[in-house]
Image (cartoon, coloured by chain):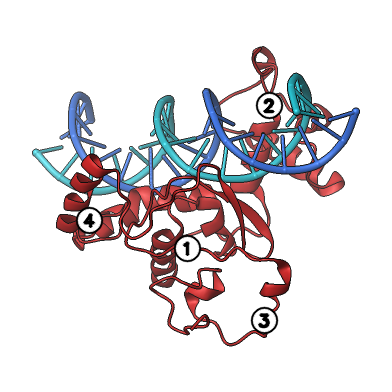
Chain colours: A red, B blue, C cyan
DNA sequence: AAGTAGTACAACCGCACTGGT
DNA sequence: CACCAGTGCGGTTGTACTACT
């Protein structure tokens, strides 16, 4: 049995949003707030599916969005976060106020990828391109993922970013040279007094090779 | 000026996850 | 426990714009 479609496609608009549609969406959300995207289009008088409304609002219409070019600092932060998190665009966006996952994803694919390639760095692994190619060959024959070999069959839940749970995949697929052995511990263990944290630790990646504060030592 | 290639980004699609029943 | 609806995420596509020939 298949999942029912998210909307009645025969009666929905697709493609670029018009100014009038934007205005309708903005005024509806201002009046009623976000939530219940499925029923929103009908209530707002929009011939769009809820998904489309949500995307338009989150990626384009939200008042707290920072439009315009990325700064050099933002570039470096994205690269750093990507090396730690992989293609977890929503998590990366969470560390960049005013930026959306879609925006960062697009920016990565159009600008940063090229920038890293020009530096001779493989954008997927964040290793020098020669080394990354060699690692790829290894992976093709041994199915090894470098320093981190994940044996568990089922995903486990880890907590990072102030309480948001994410699932780790059963296979570690990104940044093979990074130790992403994330701390899984009862809440009591997380209530250690806070030292001043380095960048990696502030992300919940205490055992990362990038850790400079050695909080766990 | 016209045609073509490259780039940037908005939007769509499909799948996974979550919570309610 | 299974099922389902709603939502969120990541990958991909479509298209407008710009640069180049």
Residue C9: x and y, percent?
56, 45
Query: Closer to the camera: disc 3 or disc 4?
Result: 3
Secondary structure beneath dot 2 equals loop
Mark 3 and mark 4 in contact? Answer it, CB < 8 Å: no
First of labels 4, 2 by sequence position: 2
Circle 3 packing at 10 Å, graded few (<14), some (14-19), many (20+), is few
Q: Say the numbered circle drawn on residue A117.
A: 4
Real-space Cα separation, disc 1 to disc 2, in angstroms: 43 Å
Q: Is residue A53 visible?
A: yes
Mark 3 and mark 1 in contact? Answer it, CB < 8 Å: no
Report the residue marked by disc 3: A192
Report the residue marked by disc 2: A48
Q: In the image, is residue A199 above or below residue A124?
A: below
Real-space Cα separation, disc 4 to disc 2, in angstroms: 39 Å
First of labels 3, 1 by sequence position: 1
Report the residue marked by disc 1: A181
Query: Closer to the camera: disc 4 or disc 2?
Result: 4
Query: Closer to the camera: disc 1 or disc 2?
Result: 1
Circle 2 packing at 10 Å, graded few (<14), some (14-19), many (20+), is many
Question: Do tags 3 and 1 sit on the same chain?
Answer: yes
Q: Chain of mark 4?
A: A
């Amino acid at each position: 049995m298949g999942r029912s479609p998210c909307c009645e496609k025969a009666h929905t608009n697709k493609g670029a949003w018009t100014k009038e549609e934007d205005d309708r969406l903005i005024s509806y959300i201002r009046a009623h707030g976000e939530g219940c995207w499925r029923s929103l289009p009908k209530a707002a008088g929009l011939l769009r599916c809820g998904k489309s409304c949500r995307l338009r609002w989150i990626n384009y219409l939200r008042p707290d969005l920072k439009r315009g070019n990325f700064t050099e600092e933002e570039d470096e932060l994205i690269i750093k976060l990507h090396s730690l998190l992989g293609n977890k665009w929503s998590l990366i966006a969470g560390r960049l106020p005013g930026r959306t996952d879609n925006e960062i994803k697009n920016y990565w694919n159009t600008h940063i990828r090229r920038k890293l390639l020009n530096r001779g760095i493989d954008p997927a692994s964040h290793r020098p391109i020669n080394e990354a190619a060699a690692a790829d060959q290894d992976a093709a024959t041994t199915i090894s993922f470098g320093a981190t070999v994940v044996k568990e069959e089922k995903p486990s839940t880890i907590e990072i970013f102030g309480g948001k749970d994410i699932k780790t995949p059963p296979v570690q697929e990104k940044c093979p040279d990074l130790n992403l052995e994330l701390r899984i511990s009862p809440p009591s263990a997380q209530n250690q007094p806070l030292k001043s944290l380095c960048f990696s630790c502030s992300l919940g990646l205490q055992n990362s090779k990038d850790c400079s504060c050695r909080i766990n030592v």
